[in-house]
Amino acid sequence: MTDTANTTRISQVGTVFVPVADQDRALGFYLDTLGFEKRADFSYGGGRRWIEVAPPGSANTISLVPPSEGESVGGDETRCAFATADIEADHATLRASGVDMDAEIARTGKRRPGLVSIEVSVGDPVPPQFFFRDTDGNRFLIVQPD
């Protein structure tokens, strides 16, 4: 049994922050290309805009934050991973939509770039997975769990 006097009451992962240069352009990508839904869109803190999007039914959200929140946009760090039930279909759909993405799905016997740095490579990734980038170059991983 956990000693609650010495632990937090954190119950879930909430929002992943993704810095974007143009919130409207990013919102269009996440809604129209990825099929996410908009969960929040409001002004705060002297005119800043808070936007949250998520896959339908997901408990976790992504907040499309302006770079004024302290980080530059884009880069080769992976912001988070998404799970899919059909990696082949999602790979084909994103490719047909013109999304910047890996040409192939990485599987056993293949290599893929590292999560934090593309200078590192991982051999024999399991389960099947591939990276894609949003309109600002933020990199995400899509994985089909077993």
Image (cartoon, rainbow, N blue to C red):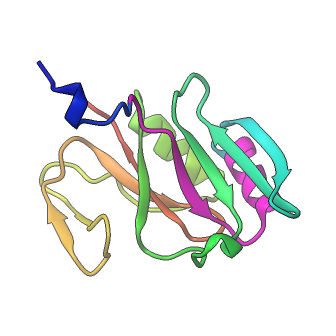
Quadrant of res 54: top right
Question: Who is closer to the viewer here, 2 or 145?
Answer: 2
Left or right? Give the position of 101 relative to 106.
Answer: right
Q: Is residue 146 visible?
A: no
- Find residue 88 and report its horizontal and vertical position in percent: 41, 38
Q: Nearer the viewer, residue 126 or 88?
A: 126
x 18%, y 52%: residue:
125
Magenta residues, as a range? Answer: 11-32
Give the image location of residue 90, x and y in percent: 50, 39
Q: Relative to residue 140, is residue 5 drawn left or right?
A: left
Instruction: Residue 125: tell me if it is visible.
Output: yes
- Let me know if residue 43 is in the magenta part: no
State which quarter of the image contains the C terminus: top left
Q: Position of residue 143 (x, y in %)?
A: 34, 42
Q: What is the residue that sits farthest to the top in this orientation?
A: 1
Residue 31 x/y as whole percent: 73, 42
